[in-house]
Image (tube, helix red, strand yellow):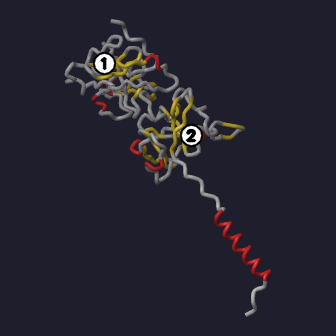
Amino acid sequence: MKPVSRAGMILIACVVLTVSCSKDSEPTPPEKKPAVQLATSAALGSYLTDTLGNTLYYFSNDYNGQSNCAGGCLALWPIYYAGDNLAQASLVSGLDIADFGTITTPAGKQTTYKTWPLYYYAPVVGGANVREAPGETKGEAFGNVWFVAKPDYSIMLVNAQLTGNDGKTYKSDYTEGTGKTLYFSDPKGVTLYGFAIDSFNINKFTKADFSNNPVWPIYETDQVVVPSILDKTLFTAIDVFGKKQLTYKGWPMYYFGADNMQRGLNKGVSVPAPGVWPVMVKDAPEAPKP
């Protein structure tokens, strides 16, 4: 075996050094971002985005927790799916995995948040639908039925047919007929009502011992986080025997017990007669002053 020449030894040393340096200089893989994140804007506050910062939206027509966007609607509002392995570790701090779910639509699986299906916005640009850029929120209030998905709404908007406890369908003026009404719900789409007998910021229904509260439970919150088409200064919270009840234009807001906290139901509109317990709407008149 011939001895290695001085030139050969130098070459070997250089190769070893190069390999060693190459291993040490390998780039560190980028940190994996959460699948669902939160962004903030001065106008809208905190709202949900995907891992790239694309805004996520909810659709008021999804009154029943299922996607009611199809055909051309899906071109403009593509569904969002976070994947099969969404877990608490996949979420940014401040979000709870218990609030997320998955539904199956004709277009595929779709992620839901607080029972609301989530979408992107992809407006037409140059003849084709192009998803808006990260940080954009141009879909907010589109048609008054599309809104950014916020983690802390106290009021959301549902667009649905009114169907009373009597099984009859009602229009927004509480005459019989068909047609959707855009009305207030809680964060999970459960219908909120007013009581025609109440006065401005005065609850005339609830008893001091809350014995009748199961029939028309008060909407118990003092938080005011609402879609951008609503004026948050028209909301306030009143004290009802030690509990806070949210009001709008002076109307205390309630659930209907027979709705069983099930989203999309609005049976209370016919009890005991149409209009006595109307769903709460943006254009409701101000409650009468006592």
Q: Nearer the viewer, residue 61 or 177?
A: 61
Q: Quadrant of residue 253?
A: top left
| View extreme (top): residue | 290
Q: Nearer the viewer, residue 149 or 269?
A: 149
- Amino acid found under the numbered disc labelled 2: Tyr
Note whether residue 160 is visible.
no
Q: Residue at x 28, y 26 (%)?
A: 217
**Does residue 163 appear to the left or right of 234 in the view shown?**
left
**x and y percentages locating residue 155 in the rendered image:** 42, 27
**Does residue 286 appear to the left or right of 49 in the view shown?**
left
Residue labelled with disc 2:
120
- Amino acid found under the numbered disc labelled 1: Asp
**Distance between mark 2 and mark 1 Cα atoms:** 39 Å
Q: Nearer the viewer, residue 224 or 286?
A: 224
Residue labelled with disc 1:
239
Q: Quadrant of residue 242?
A: top left
Q: Residue at x 56, y 27 (%)?
A: 42
Note whether residue 193 is visible.
yes
Q: Quadrant of residue 165?
A: top left
**x and y percentages locating residue 45 in the rendered image:** 52, 30
**Crowdedness of circle 1 by 10 Å Cα count: few (<14), some, many (20+)?**
some
- Say which label, 2 or 1, has the lower sequence index: 2
| In the image, residue 57 above or below residue 194 | below
Q: Residue at x 42, y 38 (%)?
A: 114
